[in-house]
Amino acid sequence: MCRVGVCLLLAVVVGEARVNSKSKEDVVRPCLLALCPCDVVSSTSLLPGEVSMGTTILAVRYNGGIVVGADTRTSVSGYVSNRYAAKLTFVLDREIDSFAVPAVRRYHNSKEDIDERNEDVKENEIVQSNQEVQTSADDRSQFSLQRLAAPEASTCVICRSGSAADTQHLASIIRSDLVSRKILYRIKGTVSHVASLLWNLLSNDSSLSASLICAGYDHELARGVIYSIAPGGTVFEERMWAAGGSGSTYILGYLDSHLPKCEEENGEKLVESEEEALDIVYNALCLAMDRDGSSGGFVRMYVIDRFGRRFVSRMPNS
C-alpha cells in the first residue's frame, strides 16, 4: 500500500474514533497490525514493564552440523535488566534425554509385538555396551573404552527473541511435550517436531510476542536443520543461515558477503569446517553488538552435531 493510501486510512480511522468517543490507540493499532503485523508485534506489543529480549540471534549451518549464537543482554525499555541472560534454550538434548526411560510395555504373542520387543532388546544392548569398560589383557592397570554406535537422537535448540516471558513459556511447553511423548509413546523428537509444535502454539495465540529460530541436528534427516519462525507463527526452513532480533538488520550484509553461495539451483555449498562457522557467528554478533543498543554482554555459542552439543563462549572485541 502506498503512503497516500496509508495516510488516508489513518485519517478516516482517527475521525471515526472521535465520533465514537474512542481513544486513537484503540482504533489505530488494529489497522497498523493489519498493515505491518511483523514489525508492530515485534516492537510495540509488549506490556508496560515487560522484559524485552531486544537481541541478536544467529544460526549457521556447516558440513556436519549447526553453530548457533546469541548475545546476553535483556532490557526493559532503556534499562538493562540482565547482562548475562541465556537466550539459547535446548528442548532436545541427547545426553539428558537418555534418562527419560519409556514406559514398560507388556508384550503379547503377535508378530508386531515380537518385532517391537526385539528392537527394544537391541537398543538396550547398545546402551549397556557403551557403558562397559574393557580391561586390556596385557596390562591390567590400563583401561580402554570401546566407542560403539549409540542410538541416534536429535539435538534441538530454540534461539529466543521477543518477550522473555513468552519465549520461556513456549520453550517450557515444548520441552514437557517432547519428554511426555518419549515416555508415553516412545516417539523420539526431531527438529521438525519442535518447529511444528511452535507453529501450532504461535498461530493459535496472537498475544504472544516471539520471533524464534529453531535449529539443531535431526537424526531422521541426518543433517543440520534451521527453521526461522515469525511472530505470527509462519515457519520457513533456511538452507544455510538464519538471523533474528533487533540487531540482525546490521549484519545481513556481512552474512551475505562471507557465507558461500549455492552454485547450482538445487545444490548446497555449506561452510566447510566448524571453526569457520564459529568465526562467522562470533564476528557477526560482535558487529551487531557494536551498533545495536539492545544487544550486548558476551557471545554465547553452541556447536550441535550428531554427537550432541558443545558450549563455546567468547568476549566481544570491543
Image: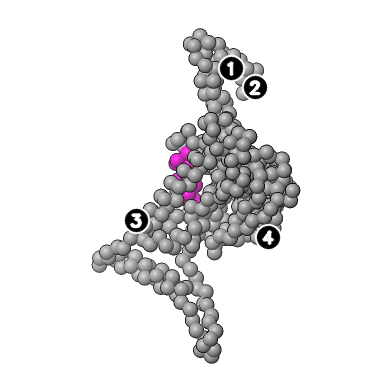
The first of marks 3 and 4 along the sequence is: 3
The first of marks 3 and 2 along the sequence is: 2
Q: Amino acid at mark 4?
A: Glu
The first of marks 1 and 3 along the sequence is: 1
Q: Secondary structure at mark 3?
A: helix
Residue at image location 42% in from the left, 73% down from the top? 128
How much space separates mark 1 and mark 3, taking CA atoms?
A: 53 Å
Determine which residue is flagged by label 2: 2
How much space separates mark 1 and mark 2, taking CA atoms?
A: 13 Å
Q: Residues within 10 Å of mark 2 (few under 14, many from 20)?
A: few
Which SS does the magenta portion mostly show?
helix
How much space separates mark 3 and mark 2, taking CA atoms?
A: 54 Å
Q: Residues within 10 Å of mark 4 (few under 14, many from 20)?
A: few
Q: Position of residue 203 (x, y in %)?
A: 47, 37
Residue 167 versus residue 60 in the image, above or below: above
Q: Could you tell me if the residues under marks 2 and 4 are in contact, i.e. CB atoms within 8 Å?
A: no
Residue situated in front as seen by the camera: 91 or 36: 91
Horizontally, is 234 left or right of 112 in the view? right
The quadrant of the picture occupied by the N terminus is top right
Determine which residue is flagged by label 4: 275
Determine which residue is flagged by label 1: 10
Residue at image location 66% in from the left, 44% down from the top? 296
Residue situated in front as seen by the camera: 31 or 95: 95
Q: Could you tell me if the residues under marks 1 and 2 are in contact, i.e. CB atoms within 8 Å?
A: no
Residue 301 visible somewhere in the drawing: yes
Residue 274 versus residue 37 in the image, above or below: below
Point out the stretch of residues depicted in magenta. Answer: 191-202
